[in-house]
Amino acid sequence: MPNIEQHLINLFKGWSGKVPVSVMKLPGSGSYRSYYRLQAGSETVIGAHNDDIRENDAFIAFTSHFRKQGLPVPEILATDRENRTYLITDLGDTTLYQMLVQNRAREARERVSLPQGEVDALFPREVLEVYKKAIGWLPAFQVKAGAMLDYSVCYPRAAFDRQSMMWDLNYFKYYFLKLAKVPFDEQALEDDFAGLCDLLLAADADFFLFRDFQSRNIMVLNGEPWFIDYQGGRKGALQYDVASLLTDGKANIPMGVRQELLDFYLDSLEKIYPVDRRKFLELYQGFALIRILQALGAYGFRGYYENKPHFLQSIPFALHNLKFLRANNLIGFGLNTLMSVIDLMIDNPALYSQQIVELNTAIYNKNNKLHIENNDEPAEKKLAVTIHSFSYKKVIPVDKTANGGGFVFDCRALPNPGRYEEFRKLNGKDQPVIDFLAKESAVEEFLGHVISLVDQSVTTYAGRGFDNLMVSFGCTGGQHRSVYCAEKLANHLKNKYKITVNLFHDEQENQGAATVQ
């Protein structure tokens, strides 16, 4: 068992006096933190591990302070600073973002055959109400709790100051513009970055700034929002967090709803703090701009540099946000070089295309193969993972290697695209089916459990020098759910490990293996 899990078990035992009956690693996100659900009887808690001690210290200190202020954040149950672990209350699995996509999908099914663009524009009333609850809490964090917060624990900086802004802007420059091959005059762009900072530094900045106030960092439990992932918080301006939530990439909040939520935020803020709305709004679009650019830097870093292609799928949403700001003359500011760069980005059709994901993956695989071939060290023996999708109406695939065994996962409990006429002639590799299943929380949870189990075996098998592992996914027809899950696992293993992945879709035409190094 990995040391992290053992540390969490020991922490759980010390806190509760019980031994957890299960320790389940939760699906990863965009951070380097790892999360686990520990269960003993009917009681569950979340265990967290993060190698960055100072970030842990910030989260624990902020959480303690916020709870004393009566704010909806998890409770710190136990900490082990030396081993970089802590336990917090379990707030469930539903984020505000998941609630949004689930309700969009449900409403789309009720309306029948809505184009994808119209589905993305849906914003169900029950979701709007939770967004308003979340935004209603924001001023209490920013103003009331922020006034008494010990900012000395902030990490990596105590304030969203010029240095922080320049870090974000250069993050965008180096990890998005350069890797996406968007041309620019570097000195002129740096001058515009300095001008944008000058503009933003005119805002009052004596408030708590979450830093990453977005729908994936808001949990929804019994219809109420709970807040997590504020360990990067610091002192800053009021505009940044609300801009962060409203320009949240894949959430794709319709512009009319954004205005309604922004007005609601200002109404909530005025109840506890006098605000000059005209001045607030003059600076708001600038903070929206720097947040969008920071997000693009993150998508580039995770997608291009770390080869996590699903982050690249968020790029078009960020570009649509920039396009709206430019079309409505909301981000002129006289920053001519920066505006020209933005125009190049929003007019580049390649940045809106799925091809950007496929191209980046192909380039990474080619470079990774060259790296291995040019390595002077002898090639290590590779584990081969064979993945099948199949139909339960036929025969469950048999592992004929010397190892035998492996996993068989039953996908028939998952939502079935085959029940809908528009999907019946498609399979789990077709984009409409992918979009349908990707929006279902049951599918995401199922794959999270699958990946956790398979990762554990892959790590152990590779370490022990095993040759083969077989994983099979079955559904009724071997067409939609099993194919989708097999593809997702194959991509995950390909991106995470230096192993061979053999992928077979047994019920599809042109049966064969796609081998990924």
Image (cartoon, grey):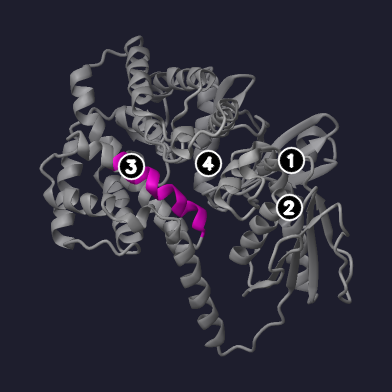
- Amino acid on which disc 4 is placed: Asp
Q: For the residues carrying marks 2 and 3, which lies nearer the camera in this image?
A: 2
Q: Which badge, 4 or 1, comes first in the chain's sequence? A: 4
Give the SS element for disc 4: helix
Q: For the residues carrying marks 2 and 4, which lies nearer the camera in this image?
A: 2
Residue 381, placed above or below residue 247: below
Verify CB contact (< 8 Å) between mark 2 and mark 3: no
Q: Which residue is mark 3?
A: 320
Q: Dominant secondary structure of the magenta stretch? A: helix
Q: Which badge, 3 or 4, comes first in the chain's sequence? A: 4
**Few, some or many C-alpha atoms within 10 Å of disc 4 (few <14, some 14-19, many ≥20)?**
some
Q: Which residue is mark 2?
A: 482
- Residue pictured at 69% horizontal, 50% vertical: 480
Verify CB contact (< 8 Å) between mark 2 and mark 4: no
Q: Which residues are magenta?
A: 308-322
Residue 324: x percent and y percent?
27, 37
Q: Which residue is mark 4?
A: 57
Q: Which badge, 3 or 1, comes first in the chain's sequence? A: 3
Residue 39, placed above or below residue 488: above
**Quadrant containing the C terminus in the rendered view:** bottom right
Label 4, label 1: how many angstroms apart (C-alpha)? 40 Å
Give the SS element for disc 2: helix
Q: Which badge, 2 or 3, comes first in the chain's sequence? A: 3
- Amino acid on which disc 1 is placed: Leu
Label 2, label 4: how many angstroms apart (C-alpha)? 42 Å
Q: Which residue is mark 1?
A: 414
Decide whether residue 318 is among the magenta residues. Answer: yes
